[in-house]
Amino acid sequence: MASNSQANATNAQDNPHDEFAKLSWRERISYGAGDLAQNLIFGTIGSMLLFYLTTVYGISAAVGATIFLVVRWVNVFWDPWVGAFVDKHNFKSGKYRPYLIYCGIPMTIFAAMLFLPIDAVRGSVMYAFIAYLATALIYSFVNIPYGALNASLTRDNDEVSTLTTVRMTEANIGNLLVYTFLPLFVQMASPNPQSKDIGFFGIHMNLGDYTSPKAGKAYFLVMGIYMIIGFIMLMCTYFGIKERVLPTAKESAAVKYSDLWVEFKQNKPLQVLGSFFLIGFTFMFFGNTVWPFYMQYNIGHSEWMASINLVGSIPGIFLVFLWPIIRKKIGKRQFFYAFLALFIVGTLVLWAWAMPAFKNATALGYIGRFLQQWGITAATGYMWSLVPEVVSYGEYKSKKRVAGIINAIMGLFFKIGLALGGIIPGYINAFFKFDGTKTSQTSGALMGIQWSMIWLPIIFALIAMWIMSKYTLSDADVKRMNEELNADRQAELDAADES
């Protein structure tokens, strides 16, 4: 096994034009570090920003949701331009990799500034808007090139599948740090600590009030540490991977902004996958956004959040290796049907847990969160493995490889889903009269949180199943297209060498 791994690594490094390269484990892990980094940097924003803005920062749920809405509308026009810019330009050190350094530094700083604990800016809608907008704009210059790298390492479909399992394992380690330990660390650093049972083998910890206006320093401290670790992970990606499947200079020069609309119009698999991204990440971020509210108010045990999330993180880290096995056994579309159904079952268990008779039954929280997270991490994680084949399909049809533009489209759907996952619950909270200044909520406000946490995600999951039924690109189709594209590319390289 060691000799095969060394041979693969040698092959990957010595032949930069091997578009079917077998990736070394170092390269797989290095690429996945970028997912971990982005979850640490931007995942913290998706999971905690609305909660922070409407409790600690002191603005209303409606205003917080509106900030999310406006920024995402800006992204609708910004991301396509970024995708075209990335596809059209090259650096001496690479096509996509350099953005991880040049834009990773300001992104890290801007993300931390969102939680700046200064009284002069607390409650300022303008500061919150500008800080969030700046972070979102620079994030596009990291996220889109990073996504394009996925299709630039190799054309080998099995390698892409393996790479996806590795990167999603690391992404879910990031999720563990964000959704499990981040709230715990913030509570540990928050004022007025009290010894509380965290719902895990009787362990007690001193946890403070992380809804208090005085908790701002705790958020900034924890977020700052997360941002620094995230940037280090981005550098691991930059130094650990090699770009191989890239557009020619002629193709890059021919890229136009309008290619985005042309590509989306003629690439049917892209339309289906983009729609699935939109719906999938919408209900995923519904759960991420509303989870702190659900635990704080509907369940009444925010101190259990870390331990229950810890159990919920198990499938996303330790069961990811099953994804390619299950996919081969039941097929591509059936994979998504099965795990979306599992998500629905877990969500219903969490609904039952909020009933007065079961609120203290931590077992229901563990079971529900485990099943829910297993379903959602598998469905929204494995769909990234379909992006390279959609890129190949577009290249096959148009004879132009625009990985940046396609990843801009995917990133746009992802960000719209992320925004809707924060916007809609915010407006639902406002409609049902949620008041972040109160320690308990009205029955109407609790029902609004329940709709955001339970019923709307279930409806979206059913819609996602229907969308995936329209995806018809088979593995045989992908293999045939990649072999033909590789043959054409090698012929061009041979002709260039002879001349």
Image (spheres, rainbow, N blue to C red):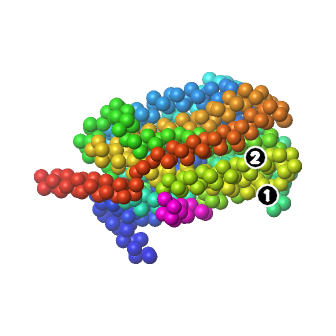
- State which quadrant residue 430 falls in: top right
The residue at which mark 1 appears reads as: 363
Q: Which amino acid type corresponds to the residue marked 2 in the rendered image?
A: Trp
Instruction: Establish if 464 lies above or below 479.
Output: above
The residue nearer to you, when weighing 33 against 220, is 33
* Horizontal arrangement in the rendering, residue 364 relative to residue 135 (left or right): right
Identified at 58% across, 55% down, the residue is 338
* Horizontal arrangement in the rendering, residue 475 relative to residue 434 (left or right): left
Where's residue 34, x and y in %?
A: 50, 51
Decide if residue 178 is in sight here. yes
Instruction: Establish if 177 lies above or below 158.
Output: above
Q: Which amino acid type corresponds to the residue marked 1 in the rendered image?
A: Ala
Where's residue 397, x and y in %?
A: 30, 44
**Count of marks placed on residues:** 2
Inter-mark Cα distance, 1 to 2? 13 Å
Residue 211, which numbered label?
none
- Earlier along the polypeptide chain: callout 1 or callout 2? 2
Identified at 36% across, 55% down, the residue is 478
Query: Secondary structure under badge 2?
Result: helix
Identified at 84% across, 49% down, the residue is 359
The residue at which mark 2 appears reads as: 351
The residue nearer to you, when weighing 185 against 420, is 420
Where's residue 331, x and y in %?
A: 49, 59
- State which quadrant residue 56 falls in: top right
Residue 319 belongs to magenta span: yes
Decide if residue 232 is in sight here. no
Highlighted range, magenta: 318-331
Identified at 53% across, 63% down, the residue is 326
Q: Residues within 10 Å of mark 2 (few under 14, many from 20)?
A: many
